[in-house]
Image (tube, rainbow, N blue to C red):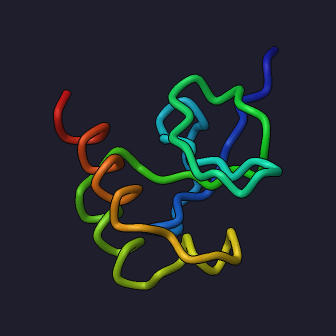
Amino acid sequence: MKKTVTRTCMGCNQKKDKKELLRITKNKQNIISIDETGKKEGRGAYICKDKECLEKLIKSKRLEKVFDMKISNEIYDELRGVLFDK
């Protein structure tokens, strides 16, 4: 029996299956990127594929706290594009 991997959404704080969430990574060069495969190297944070969760994440600046750096609006715009332009 295969174990399901769960991660916590940064927006709503709910534990969900890793495959249901979008991963955001910060690599050693402090570059933030969206990891749709879930396999990129670096520190990862997860968010539901939901507009409300993204808005909570932005409003609370939780991603900045997790990655310990300022997150540019371009990253948030890219997240919006990936989540809602599909």
Total labels: the figure holds 0
Q: Quadrant of residue 67?
A: bottom right
Residue for point 63% across, 30% down? 38
> Is the residue 84 above or below the residue 69 in the image?
above
Q: Quadrant of residue 40?
A: top right
Residue for point 79% across, 17% down? 2
Looking at the picture, tell me which residue is in the foreground, 17 or 77: 77
> Is the residue 8 above or below the residue 40 in the image?
below
| Quarter placement of the N terminus | top right
Residue furthest out toward the front = 29
Q: Position of residue 29 (x, y in %)?
A: 77, 51
Q: Position of residue 84 (x, y in %)?
A: 19, 41
> Is the residue 11 above or below the residue 86 in the image?
below
Residue furthest out toward the bottom = 60
Q: Is residue 78 left or right of residue 70?
A: left
Looking at the picture, tell me which residue is in the foreground, 65 or 22: 65
Looking at the picture, tell me which residue is in the foreground, 71 or 14: 71
Residue for point 20% across, 27% down? 86
Q: Position of residue 53 (x, y in %)?
A: 34, 63
Residue furthest out toward the left = 85
Q: Position of residue 52 (x, y in %)?
A: 25, 64
Q: Is residue 45 left or right of residue 34?
A: right
